[in-house]
Amino acid sequence: MKRRYLILAVVTVLMLAGVAVGYSFLSSNEGVMRVEEAGREFEILDQTLASKMQVYTQGVIKNLEGAADAIAATATSDKDKLKASLAQLKDKGGYDDIAFVDASGKATGSDGSTYDVMFDPYYTRALIGDSTITRSGFRTEDDDAYMATVPVMGGNGIIGALRAKLSDNIVEGNLTISNYRGREVILLLDRSGSIISVTSGTDTSRLKTILDMFEKNSDSRAQFESVIRQGRGLFLRVEENLTVDIFGKGPYYIAYQGVSGTGEWGVMMVMNEEKLFEFYANEHVDSNATTAIILFAIALAGAIGLGIYGFLETLSRNRMYNLAYYDEFAGTMNINYFRKGVNQTLTKSNSGQYAFVLMGIAKYEYLRDFFGEDEISRILKDISSILKSNVKRDEYFCHNFGEEYDLLLSYHNRDELVARLKFLEGSLESVNKSEGSSDKYALTFRYGVAFGGKDAHDFDTLMSRANMAHMEAKGKGAGAVEFYTEKMQSRIVDEKEIERDMYDALENKEFLVYLQPKFNLSTGLQAGAEALIRWMHPVKGLMYPGRFIETFEKNGFVTRLDMYMLEELCRRIKVWTGKGYRPMPLSLNISQQNLLNPEFVNDAIAITEKYGVSPNLIIFEMSEKVVVDNMNILNKIMEQMKDHGFVVSMDNFGTGSTSMNTLYNVPVDELKIDRKFLLNAEKTDRGQNVIQSVIEMAKRLKIDVVSEGVENKQQAILLREMGCDMIQGFAFSEPLPEHEYEEYAYGPRARDNSVW
């Protein structure tokens, strides 16, 4: 009997020891593993929130577009019918409010009230076919709310817009997770970094934009600013303490993912490292691992406690392996597994030639929006299956995110690699919609390729270079294959440096105004000038607009630059007036972003009034393409400009698709004939007849004609005979710095500077 009790006691002790040892080992080892993957899971959760918000916003837009079709079928001129339809749509859609806006900007609400929405730029965007969800005022007296706006199509095109006010709780409900139990801060941002929404209880009042949490000139700020403006994704571990302490003490994990499509938003998560590691090392492990160990320990004998630990550790490692390395949505391994495999292959002493290929699915967002998430998942799984059957030993692939697959392929020469990609594409194009459906489609792909070598033998370098090459391929046709070159690297670096320096440049007045004189062909004398911009960079030297304007147009900075240029022109006119000169008109090209901003004209008026400058001394130029593409909206804006005394000019005429009939409907004061149009017309009698016809028609419409890019006196004589009013060109004067232009235009020898 004593022996039986002794055995029972020993077994009990061994069982408890097994529990203790198993718990200790598993807790420590799994804790370490979880800490290693903490950052990746943090990033994935942020991407999941962004995808969740994207699915929601797209669903709202689709529902509202369906409602817009119903409104279009209603007699919108019948106020009672329209009110009833809107009230029904409001109840059915669960909107806080809804209104139909006609083409004149008059809104009719579901309660029958009417008001003006010309203050809303998203209404004007709907008139050119854009559907949006944003944070804005529903009525002028309302606080900002979440608002969806879609165009309403009639028989002859867009007849107005439908605007719906969404519930704050429903929209922001898409930004909630339970994983970290409130340790994290979640923010919804717009593309400028302004905070739209933030986790309850977090005070961000000290931040004008989220960028203010970084030191002004820090690398983290520059990197983050570039990403949010372009709506891309980013994961950062920030070592330095942030400028505000609302997120706790650093270091920090920061994840950001743009919400592509209608929202122009991004989702950001912030959590300090101490809280994140505390969660994984203690709470997350304790709550799951302890229970599992105890259950197994009770089920098995205490004597095999270490065996229990080993078994549990295997299960844990499998679970962790899937979490760390598997992409369930695409049915394949993820970027973590790919990175590990690539690094192993590249570090082998006998490794051959390898190419890193970024394969992007063309029109991915269209396919996702049209077919839905389930069908996209099926497509990705089919692609994964085909890729799996085509990779060799020591080759790897993964689904990274969205449209992107990454591959590491061996190769002997470029031609062989391209041939293999084309063969692979032939197999991938067979991925169709589900069987039995008549709605088939073919997939197309674009490829960016970077080769391994002495200067590119690590994963991050190859991936960065392949991404640059893929960006080049995206601008080309289906099946395009682009190889990384050093020029791509220098261009990307240059663009990042430009974005990093642009705000300081504006503050330090590094942007310079150059003025190119315009000449009246009747008198041969100066009749004004066109303002052109240069950037005197403290390191790069004098830069011409071709170096930076495209970047500014992409990130929206061009709108601030327009206003800076306008203010500089008004300041200079005031100086010249004070010196007793009779100032001549100055023209300035305005970006599309500003022209579509309904507040632009008011802002321009405020600047001219600030300097006491008559608006008729300012000529606003807009390119032919911008005018044609946005004619309905710009006609109203041009009329508004003219009503306030500004002069309106259509630039680059002859390079776009403007028809003769179009000019009858565009309220411009001036037409600028593009240099290319002039050169082509000069070669033949037929070409000259075309220019002659354009000038004659403009005269009938009381529109002045300016020809730019005039290269010699013979061209000037020809244009004068045709009836052209003014010219400008390097043959008579190049663009001049402000002080040189002042001497040229108003100095003692000014009248000598003439065409004739």
Image (cartoon, rainbow, N blue to C red):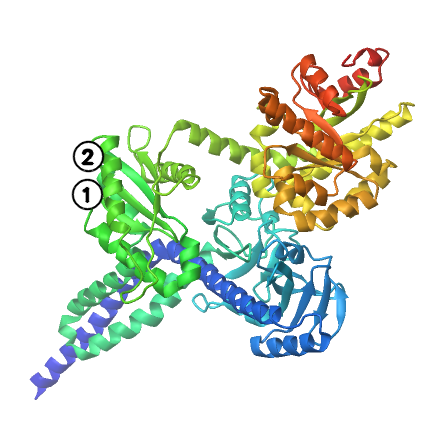
**In the image, residue 737 lies at what x, y percent?**
72, 21
- Judge from the rendering whether residue 493 lies leftward or rightward of residue 136; answer left or right: left
- Label 2 and label 1: CA atoms lie apart by 9 Å
Outermost residue to the bottom? 1
Q: How many labels does the image show?
A: 2
Residue linked to disc 1: 394
Locate residue 747: give its quadrant. Answer: top right
Residue linked to disc 2: 351
> In the rendered view, would you say 122 is above or below 75?
above
- Judge from the rendering whether residue 603 lies leftward or rightward of residue 19; answer left or right: right
Q: Which quadrant is home to the C terminus? A: top right
**In the image, residue 607 lies at what x, y percent?**
81, 40
Outermost residue to the right? 580
Q: Which amino acid does label 2 sit on?
A: Ser
Q: Which amino acid does label 1 sit on?
A: Asp
Q: Is mark 1 on a helix, strand or loop?
A: loop
**In the image, residue 56 lies at what x, y percent?**
50, 66
Mark 2 or mark 1: whose residue is earlier in sequence:
2
Q: Which quadrant is home to the N terminus? A: bottom left
- Judge from the rendering whether residue 202 lies leftward or rightward of residue 431; answer left or right: right
Question: Pointer 1: residues within 10 angstroms few (<14), some, or many (20+)?
Answer: some
> In the rendered view, would you say 683 is above or below 640?
above
